[in-house]
Each structure stands twice: as C-alpha cells, then as structure tokens.
Amino acid sequence: MTKIAPKGRPKAKTPYKRYFDGQKDTETGDGDLKHVKVFSKNRQNFTGDFISMLNKTKKPRPQKAPAKPTKEELEARPKKNPIPKETLDKYSRGEQVQPKGVKTRHFKQQQTRKEVYLEYATEQAARTELLLQETAGQLDADEGETTAEFRQSQIAENVDIQSSAKHFNLNMEFGPYQMRYTKNGRHLLLGGRRGHVAAFDWVTKRLHCEFNVMESVEDVQWLHVPTMYAVAQKSWVYFYDKKGTELHCIKRLNRVNRLDFLPYHFLLAAGNSAGYASWLDVSIGELVGNFNTGLGDIRMLRHNPRNGVLCIGGGRGVVSMWSPKVREPLAKLLCHSTAMTALAVDPKGQHLVTAGLDRAVKVWDIRMLVHDKPLTHFQLRLPANELDVSQRGMLALSQGTYLETYSDLLSGGGSGDGTRLPYIRQRCDAFVHGLRFCPYEDVLGVATAKGFQSLLVPGSGEPNFDAMEDNPYETSKQRREHEVHALLEKIPPDLITLDPQEITGVDAPTLQEKIDAKRKLFHLKAPRINMKSRRKMKGRGGTAKAARNKQIVKDAKRKEFIAEVREAKKNVIKQHKVDEVGAKGKPKTKAPRSVLDRFKPKPPKKQKT
Amino acid sequence: MSDDEEHYEPKAHKKLLQAIGSLGKVQHIQKSTRDERQSRQDEFQLVKGVSSAETDNAPRAVGLNDLVDILRTSTKHSQTGKKLKSIQGSKKVLEKPLEKPAADRIKRTIGYEGVTKKLGRWDAVVAQQRSAETQIFPLPSETVYVNTSANARPLNTRVKSNLAQELEANNRKLRELRKAEIGDTTDEKELAKQERFLLQKKLTRDELFARRKELAYLKMRESQKSAKARMQNKIKSKKFHKLQKRQKMLEQMKEFELLQKTNPEAALEKLNALEKSRVQERASLRHKNTGTWAKNLQIRAKYDKDVRKDLAEQLAVSRELTQKKQESDSEDETIKKTVVPEEEENDYDPFNPWTKRRATEQTENGKGESEDANWRQYWTKRNKNEKLLEEHRRDLVGVQDNDEQEEKETIQKPLTEVKPAKKKLKKSKVKIENGWQVEDISPTDKKEAKERPNSKAIDDIFEKHGDQIRAKLSKDSELKNTELQLALPGWGSWAGAGISKEVMERRNKRLLLKLAAPETRRDENKDNLYINESASTHARQHMVSSIPFPFRSLADYEASIRAPVGRNFVPETAFRMLTRPAVITRKGQVIEPMTESELVKPDRRLRHIVDRRIKRIPKVPPKAKIA
C-alpha cells in the first residue's frame, strides 16, 4: 500500500538555519565571491530543471475587487450546509418573541439580537444530530413467523457476543425480589424479601456487595450516584454504600413499602403502609414533605420524570398525584372501576399506564390532563401485575409468571382479543415481582420470586446516550464531577407542580382573591390618624384650641376617606348589580303608580308550589 | 464844528454809553473768572456781575457746532464736519450693557450650541459602540489613518553624480568662508527651522477671515440674545411671565426625562434642583391670596369674572405646590391605611348607622377587635348549622309533614348554637335588638339563595364515585363568599312576622351583590378527573407578580425565557456565544481614549456568523418615523 500525500497539505517550512549549513560562499577561480543559493537539506542534491522552475515569478493576482453580490443573489444562493427543517423543528425551543410584544426600541433590538443567538444555538444543536450514529435495533420476523415466537435462547444465539452476555439468569433463594437499575443503566440493585441485598455492575458482572440485612426487605432504590442506595427494611429505611456499609438509618421513614428517587430534586420518595407519603432530601437530609395521603397502604408509587410529581395508585382505581409541599393531591384520575394492580409512567412523562383487576390496561395522557378518557385501552386475559415502559416506548407487562412486551405503547397490545400478538413473550419460572427496562440497553430486568432474569428486548433502549446527562461508561472522576453539577442545579421541592412550565408564568390574582378584595372594601374602617401638632408659638391659642384643630383635621381626613370608600363601593355595586331584566329576559317597565291604583282589581295570585 | 466834535473817540464813547446803560443795575461787581493764573483767588467772588449784554458775548462751552464751524473753514475737513453733524442728528445712545449673569447666560448658551455640534459628530460612533455585541478594548486598529499631506516631501528621485556632489560641497565651504570673513555667526539651519515654525504657526488669509467671521457671528448672536432678554425683562404682563415660567418648567422637565434615560445621576441632581426650586417657591408663599396683588384683585373679584378665574388659578397652583409635599411625606400613612382595615374590617359597615355606633362603643369598651361580632358571620354559621341539621333530619325521618314544628326546631337550634358568640356581645345586642330578633323568624330564605347552582351536577357525580366527591366538594375547589348581602339583618321585616318568603327574597335580592359568576373549573365536565386548582401556592411564591418590563404580554415574556443557556442544554459553541462578555479587555494594555480617526474608520470585519446575522437585521426605525 502506498501512501499519497494529502493534496491540500501546506509545504514544509524550511528548517531553521543551523551553524553547519550557514552561508556558503564558494570561491571561484577568478577570485570573486559568487553567491550560491542554499536550499533545505532534502533539496540539496537537485540541480537543473528544478531550479528553473523556482525562478518563475509568481503572477500577481488580479487587482479587481470582487463584485459585491446583490441581495437577490445572496438570497438565491443556497446555503453551504443546509439543515433540514424537520431537524431544526426537533431542536427548536418554541416560538420566537415577536418584536411587537417588546416595549422600547432598545429592548426590541436587544430581543431580536437574542433571537439570532438562539437560532444559532438551535442550528448548532441540529448539527450535532450527525453524531447520533447509533440506531435502535429491531426484531424482524420473516414471512410466516412472528416475533413472539422467538425464545430468549434463540435471540441470544443470534446476537453478538457482547449482547448475548447481557442475557442471564440468577437463581436466588431469598424470596420475592425487588430490583432497580441506576439512571445510567450500568448498575443493578437487588433486594430479596428475606433480607438479601446485592449490588453489582451487571454488564461486567462485578459484584459490589452482597449481604443479608437479617430483616425483611420491602424495596430498594439507588440514590443519585451508583455508590449509594436506600433499602426499605422492615421498620425503617437504611442507606448503604457500594461496599455494603450502613450509612444512615432513617427512622422517620418507617414501614415503607415503596421507594422512588427524583434525581433532579434529590428527593427520595417513600410510601408507607399507613398511607404516608414522604420526601427526603438526600442532599441535606431533611424531610421536605411527610403527610398522610389517606389512601391506605401504598403499594404502587412512581414519579413522573417530567414534573417530579409522585403518582400513587390506590385500591379504588384512582391515581392521585402528589407534590411534597401540598398536602392535598394535585390531581386525581379515576382509571379503573376496580382496584388497580400496577402503574407506570413513561420516561418522557407523557403517558401514564395503569392496569387494574378488571384485566384492562389503559394509557393516559398526563401532560396537560385535558382528557379524562384513556388514549388506548386494551383488555388482557388476566390482570397485569407489573408494568414498565422503556425509553423508546415499549411496554412490558407481567401476568403472574407470564410476561409480554409490546413494541409500541399506544398501538401495540391487547392480547385479549387474540388478533395481535406481543412483540416478545416469556414464561418465567416463578411469579414476577419486579419489572424494569434497563436505560440505554436493550434489556428487560425481571425480578421474580426465585431470582432475577435479564432478557433481551431488541429496540427497547435509547441507542444514543447524552454523556452530560447519563454516562454508562463514566469514570469515578466524571461521576464526582457530575454529582457536583447535579447538586448545583438541584430543583427546590416547591417547584414540583403539575405543569413544569408554571414557574415561567405570571402570578395573577385568582378570582377568589379578587372577590375577597372587593368584599374587604365593604368592611373598611377609617384609619386612625396620629396628628402631631406643630410647636406652639407664643400667644397662638392654648391647648383647647390645639385640641380643637386636631379634631377638625381628623374629621376632615375621616370624611375624605369615607367619601373615597363610598365611591369605590358604588363602583362595585354598579358593576355587579344583577339586572332584573337579565334574569327574566324581557325588560320590566313599570308604569308609575298612581294613588288611585289601589282601587283597581288585584291580579289573581299565582298558586304556591 | 467844534473841537469837541472833532475829538470824537469811538472807544471812549462806547465806554460812556455802557456806563450809562448800566446805571440802573444794582451790582457792579463782576463775577470772578479764572482766565489767568493767580496765586490767590478772591474768596467772596466780589466781582461785578455780568450784564445781560455781556452774557451774550461771554464765552460759553464749546459745542459741536463750533467744532463743525471750524471744520467748515477748510475744504479738507468739510466732509468730516458733515459726518459729525449727521451723527449728532441721529442721537443714538448706546444701550446699557446687560447685567453680568444675564450676559454670561447668553454666552453659555451660545457656547453650548457650538459644543453640541462638535460633540454631535461622535453620536454615531457612540451609538455603534453601545449597540455592539462585544466591545474590545483597547480598540483594535487594523488601519492607521495619518494625514501626511502637510509633511509630504518629494522623493529624492535623482541620483547626484560625483561631480555634482563635489560642487555642492565646495559651495558650502565657500559660503562658510565668506561668512567667516564678514564675521557673521548666525546659524542658517537654526534660522530655517525658525522660519518653518513661524510659517506653520501663521494662519493663512482665508483662515483669518473665517475666524474673524466666526467671531463676528458669535458677537452678533450674543447681542441679539441680549436684546431679546432685555425686551422680555421689560414686559410687565403677569400672564406672559407665567407662561414663560411654565414653558421653562416644561423644558426642564423634558430635559430631566431625557437625562433620566441617558444619565441617571445627573437626572437625580436635576431632580434635586427642581425640588429645591419648588421648595423655595413654596417657602416664599407666593401663589397665596395674601399678596398685595391678590388682595387688590379680591376687591375687584366681585365684579369681574376673569379676575376670579385668575385668583382661582393662583390658589390652585398653591394647592398643587403644597399637596405634592404631603404625598411624598405620607407614604407610611398610606401603608397604615391598608394595614389597619384588615384587622378591623369585620365590624364596620358604613351603610349601617347601627353598626357604626356599635363599633365606636366597642372601642370605648376596649374589646372591639377581640370579638367577632358580625351579623354576617352569624348568618353563615347559622345557615351552615341549618344545612347540617336538615340533612341529618332528612336522613332520620324522611319527609315530615308538620311544617310549623320543623320551623320551630330550626329556630331553636341555631339560637343555642350561636350562644357563645352572643354572650360576648350582650351590650351591643341590646342596641340593635329588634334587628336580630325579627330576623330569626324567617331563617331558611337565605340558605336557599346561597345554594350552589351546580349542585345537581355534583349530586350526579356523587352517585358515580364517592371518592371523588369528597375532593370536589372540599374547600379548595370552591369559590367562597361570592355573594355580598348589602341588606342588614331585619331589613324589610319591621312589620313583623308573616311576610311571605317570596317577598322577602325579592326585597333582599335587590340588595344582593353577586361578585362573581361561578367559575368554570379546569376539570369541568370531566367526571373521572379532579384537578386541585389552589395547590400552586408554593410555586406562586417563585413566580413574578406581573409581566416584567419590556414585555407587553405573557406570551412574549414566556417566549423570552423559553430557551436555556447552560452548557448542558446547548452545544458548547452556542454556549460560548450566548455567554460572551459585553466588554473584552486585553490584559496589561493601556486603554487610550478614542481619537478622531475613529470617526472615519470603516466597520470592523465580523468573523462570527452570529455577528454577521445581527448586522443584517434591519434597524427598528425610531418612534417618530413610525408615527
């Protein structure tokens, strides 16, 4: 193979002059000194033609200034690297500010300039699309086959070695297991009901720690870094580190059933068997919210990643949404007419998936809560007892030991009618107790009564990860850096509302406040006036006169105030006076009553009902 | 002919005649004159007085005419004489110069005009610098502009031959020798240098003319202005001065507003000055009707309408002047105004003479605020009790046929319920006794009026899901106190019991204010959904209370904060552009002030695409053009 020098490479510079290749003046026979041009070392040997080439003088460039392109030409000329509009729209942050909506000329200009910056930012973001090289996988069935037919062993055989290593089973004997992946999908935490807790890097299968807490374990949850996790044990919640060292025992979180973690708020959310919902700020170790929801034993609890609201499923088929600072539910949604069995929120926070004892699975749009009807609704043969939604919108549900996944949350699903088959199905050896998709991997983790299974579900995980956000390959240094940044950007718990954009709005007074202000007007009392009389001049009246003057001023002020209030009241009354006309529809014009009218016969009275 | 006749001497004869003529006069002593040098002056001026004839001939002061007459004698000066004469005829006397402050003021205004013109040249540069995205200091000087025309020297194009050089040297030598012979020691080079310097310094004729012209113009303007000022000072019209003053004030205000935008500190000073002038005016007690002018006018005011108007205006001005001060002083008082009523709102209804008296009495007793002696509260409480009671009864008995019995019960029940509140109020109750007691008879009328209009819909939902109803009816979701009853308890029932419900209702309806229509909820008509609408109290603390300044609508404000800036949200290149500093200075370099070359410098070449795009944005035209 021959190497060709790149075309556009700049010519090598002549090296610096050294002492040995200094100016060489050669003496000719005539005794004159003749100047000899010295070339660089590598060209020393060349003679003849090459030199003559060098002697050629460079042609001067034409002096004519290039014609300035006209406006039309500028517009007509296509851009060098155009970005397709769809990509731009994808990265767009929304509508621009209209210059009309900005007040002064200066600020108008400032705003238009800012829009240019933002446009540039959008363009740059759209250009980074180029870097997203990974594509999501997909199982494609040949004709006459369905994807539901494929067994895990078949899939594992046909994928590359790295991927096939991601399919494994763990048989463990400490009873029904709960499991969690870290946010970057690298580490796995298992907690067995009978006290077994194990944390490991599931990709390399390197065990961090494994121990028995000698207590029942209800739930486990990673904290903001993969070096710490919380375990809800029989009575209290404990924090452990990666090595299994007990860090804290949170006695204020007692008899907790379910744990969840809000990574951007640093809140560990817990629901206990007495119906209490609690939020523990793990960065400062403070309970930011702890109150009784009145829902009884909390068995289903997931947070909405979009707004940080905690969704709690109840036994009455109602999903209620909670914020740590508000002691009442932000919203309630009646999802099933029977008791609920499972709920899941998709990673984008768009959809809520619920399953009930009525064997139905429903998908709800929970962004704006404009509809009280589900987006889709499908019927199963048995009620689903666990649910999860993957990053790319795949749905996994389990019915006892049997487990199905659907490739699309909205369109796929409904094995109940028998016409549509699931994407992949699997029968586990034991009852399924936990079910989570692994982020950034095509893997579904299943925690059963007898252990743990890692199943391959092609196309479930997001193929391109944002290393600023979640980095599955992060080093410890990066992890520490990330932790600091995340702490700096921590969102206060006050801001957990249904609409995450609410904070950008303006706090307008509610109707109730307006009403109260008007009411208040009718109960206003004239303020007390403290008049300090000036220093009395000699011979200018005594105390009696001063007192009288004071009284006069006070009276005047009071009268003024009363007049003002009266005026305001009149306005209010005028504004809200109920028209007798409006109620009945036709104007009531009464003839002026005469004195003699009393002698007229009375109109017949209406019968009382 | 006699000898005597022959001896006629005219001189003597004249003297004689004079002597005869002056016989009758009293004084013969002439007034002393200082026509020659004398060592002693007669102390008493005892000289003979001047006769009338003598005074005619007596020398008088030299007038202009005399001069002219003299000048007329020679043809050479006749012209000058005429000129002098004509000057006297015109009789123009020079004006008295203006007072120094006035003259100075005029000088200053003229000077100001010149300076503004000079500084105005920088406006474009300053505006550009201000609106630039980034300013880099020290100013990058890509091209240096030097005016070289003055120092231009022709190139030494010819090469001198050896011979010429030799000749030149010889010449120089010769000249030096000659100089030495003469004994001249002046240095030619030095002289040449001086000459050049002087030449440089000397102004050309045109320049001189221009300068003189400018000076003349300035002088002319000054004199014009001074004349105008003098004229205006002479004007006695009060109205004119008033108008002038107002105009001046307006001008100052305008100036102040302009300053406020451009230079807040100076504006503050200006404001202080304005305030001071106002205070001074106030202190001087002009604009009162106590001055002589006003008093005179007052006499005439009876008959003249215009005068009355003038006086009123004067007073209005004074009021305005004094009032302003009050406003600024009484800020804390207004705060009090808002705070106080919150505490005492409940027991005061200005429409009601009864409660008013009661309120005053309470304060006298010293327990006014502690008690909730409010008839409205009483009513709400009672109504609630009744509601509960009725429900309870409905559950227990179902339909009861005896109406009267029921009514009795309802009367008794609330009375017992409200007892504790009443106990505290014993004294006041006596005062308005009849009002309370009569009202008790028709207790159910208001309850029905207050029933929510959409209660039926709620019932339907209740049947559906018992769980929801609890929340939907819970206190958060309901508009409270939307109605305001202006009628006092007992209103329209003085005649006693037995007035039909309809009549009462109709009467009270006239005095019932509906402050708001029932609000449509977000989850209206959504049976399966409940949204808590008052839950956002915590988030509200973090929100802005009104649309921030440059934005007109909420949508614009929201759009302005739609995009994040941080590194995690935008690409690094964009982040750097977004967070680019407005001013960049180079380390360790002195920042010199701008020179005039900055005025003619071409625009800096913009490297970044954002800068180029910004440059392409059409400028928003100034407001004057839009309108």
Image (tube, coloured by chain):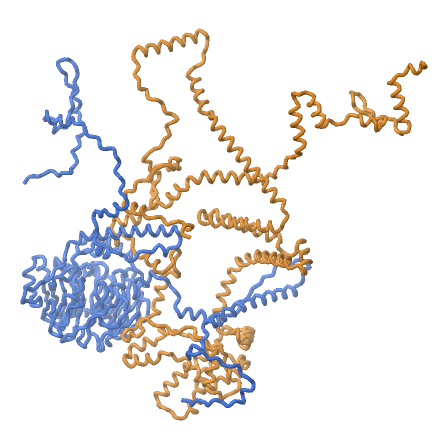
Q: Tell me where residue B179 appears, x and y as whole percent.
A: 43, 9
Residue at the outermost top position: B181
In the rendered view, would you say A53 is above or below B275?
A: above
Image quadrant in which you'd find residue A147: bottom left
Is A417 situated left or right of A274 in this image?
Answer: left
Q: Position of residue A367 (x, y in %)?
A: 26, 66
Q: Is residue B576 above or below residue A316?
A: above
Horizontally, residue A325 falls left or right of residue B385, namely left
- List the single residue furthest toward the bottom: B402
Check the rendered structure and report the hue given to chain A.
blue
Q: Does residue B587 appear in this view?
A: yes
Letter of the orange chain: B
Image x and y of residue B589, in percent = 35, 37
Front residue (pair A299, B605) = B605
Asked if residue B101 can be seen in this view, the reply is: no
Decide which of A446, B151 is in the foreground and name it. Answer: B151
- Residue A199 lies left or right of residue B186; in this view the side is left
Which of these two is toward me, A383 or B170? B170
The residue depicted at 17 percent of the width and 36 percent of the height is: A10
Where A303 falls versus B379 (above or below)? above
| Number of numbered discs visible in the structure rendering | 0
Residue A210: x and y in percent read 15, 62
The image quadrant of residue A420 is: bottom left
